[in-house]
Image (tube, rainbow, N blue to C red):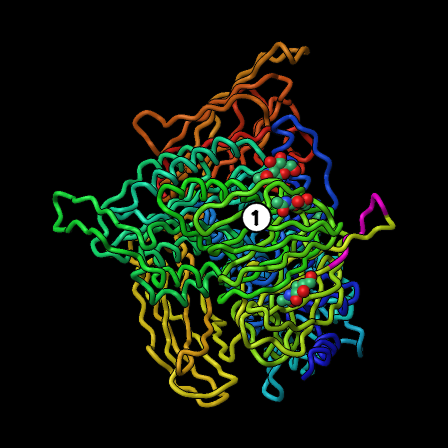
Amino acid sequence: MSGLAALCLLLLQTGAFGFGINLFNIFRGDSLIHEDITERAILNVTAQVCRALALAEGKDFTFPPLTPNAVAAACEASKSSKSFCKAIKLIQENNRGVDMFRFYLPPFHFDDETFSEGRNIITDGLSAVKASNKRENFEAAREQLGKILHPLQDFYSHSNWVEIGNKLPNSNLIRSLTSIGNIAAESRATCRNCNGDDCSNNILDDILREKILTSGYFNFVPFFSTKPKGKCSHGGGFDRTSNIEPKGGINKDTFGSSHGYLHMTAANMAIAATSELLEDIRGAAGDKTFLQMMGISKGKALCFVIDTTGSMGDDIDAVKTVTSSIINTKVGTEDEPPVYILVPFNDPDFGPLIRTTDPNVFKRAINALSAAGGGDLPELSLSGLQLALTGAPPNSEIFLFTDAPAKDLYLKSTVIALIERTKSVVNFMITNILGFRRRKRSDDSQEQEQQNIRMVTSDAQVYKDLAQASGGLAIQVTKSELLMATSIITESSSSSLVTLVQASRSPGKAENFTFTVDESVRNLTVYITGRSVTFILISPSGVSQESTNTTGSLITASHSVGNFMTLQLKTQAGQWEIKMVSTNPYILKVVGESSIDFLFNFLEESQGPLGGFDVVNNRPRSGVNGSLIVTVIGSDSARVTEVILVASSGSGEVTGSVEALGGGDFLARFDRIPAEEFVVLVKGQNSNSSSRASSVIFQRQSSTNIRASTVTVTSPNSNSVLVPGTPLSVPFSVMTNGEGGNFTIQATNDKGFNSTFPSNLILETGGSANGTVNLTAPSNTPSGTVVTLTVEAVAPGSTDTNYVVLRFTVLKTVTDFNSPVCQLLSLQSNCSDNCISSMWELSVQVTDGAEGTGVNRLSLRQGNGTLNTSLAAGNENITLVSYNASCCSPDVELLVVDGVGNVASCFYSILKTTPTATSSPQATTNSPSPTAVAVVSLSNRAAQSLFLCLGITILGINLPMGNN
Ligand SMILES: *[C@@H]1O[C@H](CO)[C@@H](O)[C@H](O)[C@H]1NC(C)=O
Ligand SMILES: *[C@@H]1O[C@H](CO)[C@@H](O)[C@H](O)[C@H]1NC(C)=O
Ligand SMILES: *[C@@H]1O[C@H](CO)[C@@H](O)[C@H](O)[C@H]1NC(C)=O
Ligand SMILES: *[C@@H]1O[C@H](CO)[C@@H](O)[C@H](O)[C@H]1NC(C)=O
Ligand SMILES: [Ca+2]
Ligand SMILES: [Ca+2]
């Protein structure tokens, strides 16, 4: 079936599985789909968080239009538009994936009255999101979040929650062990036949009157579909149960659905419910962590992978110097790294990964490194790199320092898979090629002094290959040159770095490269690695200059160290040219700083009955046609005009046809995906609002080199929560478009957890085979640990390979479902009419109950007084809170979080008003104080609306205790 036919089929029959799943919003009319609902809620809550933080710092905040670019800008983090967009897309993709992979399972959609099962999916997943966030494993948190938003949103479309008159979301869908509502008994009839096509009156009157909760039955299997007597159906062409009496359906997925007249009501309630769930995650995580989960941060992660074996003393010193310099120059600026990552490797050990947001913690970790051990010459560099790639945010720039060959070469393909999946760039800082290796003699080991051992050029090949695959550089310098080389490359690294052109030639050859520089580009820089590489630069105005000419006007600064050369070019918009003269091998990279960039993903026609497209998260199919979705970042007016797949070797290119999908998304279709390695080149126009006439042409290139494959590896149905000590079966399938034979399987995880898997699978030509990886986390693994599993299938002859990368969150079974409880001890005030000169104070004790996980975090969501906490003498399970504030700040709202992320909100006020708020099932506050002051416990929602009306102060306090 052609893509368009699939889309049309989808369009005609949409509505079977939730708020539409069509990736291509161009065809979906005005209906809201899961992507819209998800994005609107994320943008709303993210903006609310930034507003709260801004107001707390005494800044003004103008609520932005709800686009990713505008919200990132309002959060003063314009440079994180890309990571914000990427986070939203990942959440949307996982939401959509539930329809692609789990549409047979009713609880994922609240079909078939599976209310408590559906709620369990949400609450279990929510625990995993909170646990992942607590350990700053944000990618895993995003994936999990997407998966639970799907059933949450479907509830409002597939149940009769809206029909029975509810005006607010069902808060108990995100709380375990609470009542979801008055659920229809199995035997109770809920619907009558529709009146022909008119289903507006098909729910039975007694169901509506008694507010009985039901949902539509759904089955797409022809002839064999059944449903219990008298029950409502989902409705729509795909649902075979809707032809069984009572006929018709009740879903509100689109305007055209059986209950399409309620589509907007249901969709808006789904947005509100999504906002509510995000608020709960925010409460558990704290505002700053919540923003990090959403990819909003200033600057870009600083990530070092360092060989710490005996000969690395000088290199480690260079890293120490560079780290302090980066921290000294970037902290407090827009380029301050939001997170610092360090992975040491040695032999036989590597890791652990150290990840911190505190520059001083990072400095201490780096300064604690020393060079020792390592045994024989090769070291575990790829194991270290694997950890960095799985632990760093996607699109990171990673620096690896070593002077030795890799001992763990079997990980090369896994590392390439992770590079392709994360689109991170890896730069190798290699010292000592052909030099001497000094090893300190360590007294208590048998280690021999190793002299005169050389890392030969061929040993560095794996590093060059990995650098090239990721769009990074393999810089080879002497130990004395390392500091300079590292300073140049790390200090120029900015979170808004974009690639204009990049090429790698080995052997080198004379070749001319042209590239367009647009007006948004600053700090235009050329990086080259290679020996004695010479070229001629030609500027847009036709001035030419040799690379060796340092007095000309085009090159404003240049450095050359080892095999690494960098030139700062005069910033001039227009078409530039670089003519390579020398014929030595080289990597050429032209970068600049700009807010305009792009994201891309390959798509393939879905194999599911709904048609449409799936995102390809591994290598796309080679030799056949294919599609790419490109999203422009950093400008709401930029338009993509050309998308080109350029062979990395320079031997050819394939140009796609481009179609705008709205919202910054563009679809590019290609007749053929190249069989050889390639990069994605995007050209477009950014209509400049200041000078309307001149629309400005821009070009950007992917840094990652992409390979296509005739092999496909998928793992659709695996559960993403791993219970420590319990093996998890992860099914996977391998398919081939090409020759059959014996396919080698390799399953690797970054945490060294035990796993079993078939070492090979036999496939017929054009056939497929299934396998299972059994993965076990040791029983003492902390909750929130994330393990990344890479399953690779290598075709016979090792000529072709593909993989699937899966993330699992380790989560001990949660038994604490109760929020902490606040109890008022005293409230004293001497407030007079002149509030400025009077104070009030409050004393509260907070506990999480005997069975609880303890009070883990306490913060102020409202009130700008002073908060102090301490543990009760003799009882560590009781936290004493004292708060005092000016009488001008009459309210206080405490947010109390336990060890598993249950959030309580405790509200106190000195205003003598009658409490009208409802009591949340869990955030309860004890009886009012004898001073007859209103002490109110609010549900989250009431608290939020209050919080919207008043000025607020956020003051996060991390408590040291908490027996989580
Ligand atoms: C936006 O989020 C706030 C909470 O952060 C919530 O109260 C409000 O209902 C949300 N708006 C919509 C339209 O969902
Ligand atoms: C980049 O450009 C800005 C001004 O646009 C300048 O302040 C900064 O020093 C430049 N950075 C580098 C590494 O040249
Ligand atoms: C590069 O351009 C020059 C003209 O400026 C031309 O003479 C030369 O053949 C070109 N080189 C290649 C490899 O195309
Ligand atoms: C260097 O380039 C400039 C033009 O940018 C030119 O005027 C000058 O003659 C060149 N110098 C040498 C030594 O080639
Ligand atoms: Ca070794
Ligand atoms: Ca608890």
Q: Is residue 309 visible?
A: yes
Location of residue 413 in the rendering, given as x and y in whole percent from the top left corner = 41, 68
Quadrant of the drawing holding the N terminus:
bottom right
Residue sitting at x 60%, y 22%: 910
Location of residue 180 in the rendering, given as x and y in whole percent from the top left corner = 56, 56
Location of residue 642 in the rendering, given as x and y in whole percent from the top left corner = 72, 65
Place residue 875 in its image quadrant.
Answer: top left
Magenta segment includes 185: no
Q: Amino acid at mark 1?
A: Thr
Highlighted range, magenta: 684-691
Instruction: Determine the secondary structure under disc 1.
Output: loop
Q: Quadrant of ligand 4?
A: top right
Residue sitting at x 58%, y 87%: 224
Q: Is residue 207 visible?
A: no
Tag 1 residue = 548
Q: Left or right: 757 with respect to 132?
A: left
Q: Is mark 1 within 8 Å of ligand 4?
A: no
